[in-house]
């Protein structure tokens, strides 16, 4: 037997032995061992730090895989996914809010999920699953749910607001921060004005009434914050005393020593959801599904949720007394939320923003 033949036989025997011992000799990207890597997007700031501690570190420890985090925001991730066109995407898992999730699904930038492959799927809140379902297919694994209500300065506002209409009160005139419709809290507030009175975003007459109501704020708005930093700055420096904003951010500001409070409007807060989606064309599906199981796990969600002051999607989390005392959460609560109809809002957003500009600019 020649040297090449001998080596071929030895190699074949080695492969058979490996298979018999259960060793994976194929580099499929799904085992999580042997230097496998996964690329995952995260929102920048404290969110990223908590995400790493809550999910990435235990996943890397358990699997031996490496998770590369890509901090940023919805718009830039969508742009990169569109450029990839479903082939070799720059990341495997992307976190999106509903306004970005809809165009991602419509553009086939993300895959429908095989939910049987997601550990702990059955423990996830049904309302949140419903909000990440399109045409009967589940696309996202919900992670956290928050709500938009009214953030206010406790040392400036004599009486805490109770409902959305309180922002139109004379006591707040000249001290209202109003995010534009192109920033999530702004659109969520506008949606609440429409749906809180029994209207629909799809009904032009209901939308017209909401714009007419917004005209009452002309001359009363002191700031038009278009991002989180601007909102916090306007409230902290006293430029604004009240602003439509998220509960989690509000309670984080209070925890950091800010003189702020938060109101869940009695007519209904507006739901805000963050979910993870599997990018079309990812070559690491098996490893991605394994990581999604960690994202859906109550044990790992709890520290992330309590650290961010946003409820997790797993219904089995037993929160701390401090969290329970502040955050409204649970399936029954989520069903009382107003939810932005992005199928209607997204194609109308530029037109609505122009109408908004005519009032306030």
Image (spheres, rainbow, N blue to C red):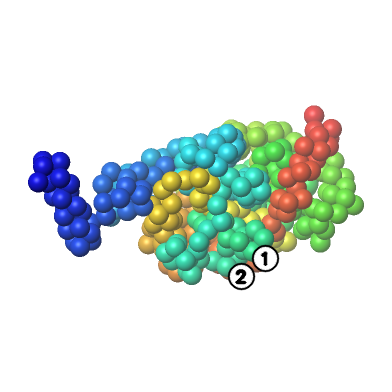
| Residue lying at 82% horizontally and 43% vertically, measured from the top left | 214
Looking at this view, is 312 or 39 the one in front? 39
Disc 1, SS: loop
Residue at the limit of the structure toward the right, as seen here: 205
Q: Using a 10 Å C-alpha cutoff, classify the residue at mark 1 as few (fewer than 14 neighbours), some (14 to 19) or many (20 or more).
A: some
- Compared to residue 79, the image places residue 296 above or below, namely below
Q: Which mark is residue 336?
A: 1
Q: CA distance from mark 1 to mark 2?
A: 7 Å
- Compared to residue 13, the image places residue 237 above or below, namely above
Residue 20 visible in the picture: yes
- Image location of residue 59, percent across then percent down: 33, 52
Q: Which mark is residue 304?
A: none
Residue 95 visible in the picture: no
Residue at the limit of the structure toward the front, as seen here: 1
Q: Is residue 43 left or right of residue 177?
A: left
Residue at the limit of the structure toward the top, as seen here: 361
Disc 2, SS: helix
Q: Using a 10 Å C-alpha cutoff, classify the residue at mark 2 as few (fewer than 14 neighbours), some (14 to 19) or many (20 or more).
A: few
Would you identify the image quadrant in which residue 236 lies?
top right
- Compared to residue 196, the image places residue 358 above or below, namely above
- Image location of residue 301, percent across then percent down: 42, 58
Say which quadrant the C terminus sits in. Answer: top right
- Image location of residue 330, percent across then percent down: 55, 67
Dots 1, 2 in contact, CB < 8 A: yes
Looking at this view, is 139 or 89 the one in front? 89
| Residue lying at 64% horizontally and 45% vertically, measured from the top left | 107
| Residue lying at 80% horizontally and 40% vertically, measured from the top left | 352
Looking at this view, is 76 or 55 the one in front? 76
- Image location of residue 309, percent across then percent down: 49, 53
Q: How many marks?
A: 2
Looking at this view, is 254 or 124 the one in front? 124
In this figure, which residue is indicated by the disc labeled 2?
332
């Amino acid at each position: 037997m020649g040297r090449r033949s001998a080596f071929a036989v030895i190699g074949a025997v080695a492969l058979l032995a490996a298979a018999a011992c259960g060793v994976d000799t194929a580099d499929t990207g799904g085992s999580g061992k042997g230097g496998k890597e996964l690329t995952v997007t995260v929102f920048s700031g404290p969110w990223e730090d908590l995400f790493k501690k809550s999910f990435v570190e235990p996943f890397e420890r358990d699997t031996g895989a490496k998770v590369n985090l890509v901090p940023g925001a919805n718009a830039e991730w969508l742009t990169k996914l569109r450029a990839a066109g479903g082939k070799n995407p720059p990341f495997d898992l992307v976190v999106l809010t509903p306004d970005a999730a809809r165009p991602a699904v419509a553009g086939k930038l993300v895959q429908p999920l095989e939910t049987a492959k997601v550990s702990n799927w059955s423990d996830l809140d049904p309302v949140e699953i419903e909000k990440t379902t399109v045409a009967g297919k589940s696309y996202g694994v919900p992670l956290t749910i928050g709500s938009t209500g009214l953030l206010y300065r406790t040392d400036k506002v004599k009486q805490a607001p109770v409902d959305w209409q309180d922002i139109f009160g004379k006591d707040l005139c000249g001290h209202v921060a109003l995010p534009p419709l192109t920033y999530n809290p702004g659109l969520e507030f506008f949606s609440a004005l429409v749906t809180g009175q029994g209207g629909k975003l799809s009904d032009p007459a209901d939308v017209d009434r909401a714009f007419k109501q917004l005209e009452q704020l002309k001359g009363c708005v002191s700031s038009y914050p278009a991002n989180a930093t601007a909102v916090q700055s306007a409230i902290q420096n006293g430029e604004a005393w009240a602003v439509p904003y998220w509960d989690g951010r509000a309670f984080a500001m209070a925890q950091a020593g800010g003189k702020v409070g938060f109101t869940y409007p009695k007519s209904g807060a507006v739901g805000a959801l963050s979910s993870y989606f599997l990018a079309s064309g990812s070559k690491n599906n098996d490893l991605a599904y394994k990581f999604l199981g960690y994202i859906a796990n109550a044990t790992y969600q709890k520290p992330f949720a309590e650290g961010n002051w946003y409820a997790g999607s797993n219904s089995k989390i037993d929160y701390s007394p401090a969290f329970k005392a502040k955050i409204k959460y649970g399936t029954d609560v989520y069903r009382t939320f107003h939810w932005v109809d992005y199928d209607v809002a997204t194609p109308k957003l530029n037109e609505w923003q122009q109408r908004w500009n005519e009032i306030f600019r």
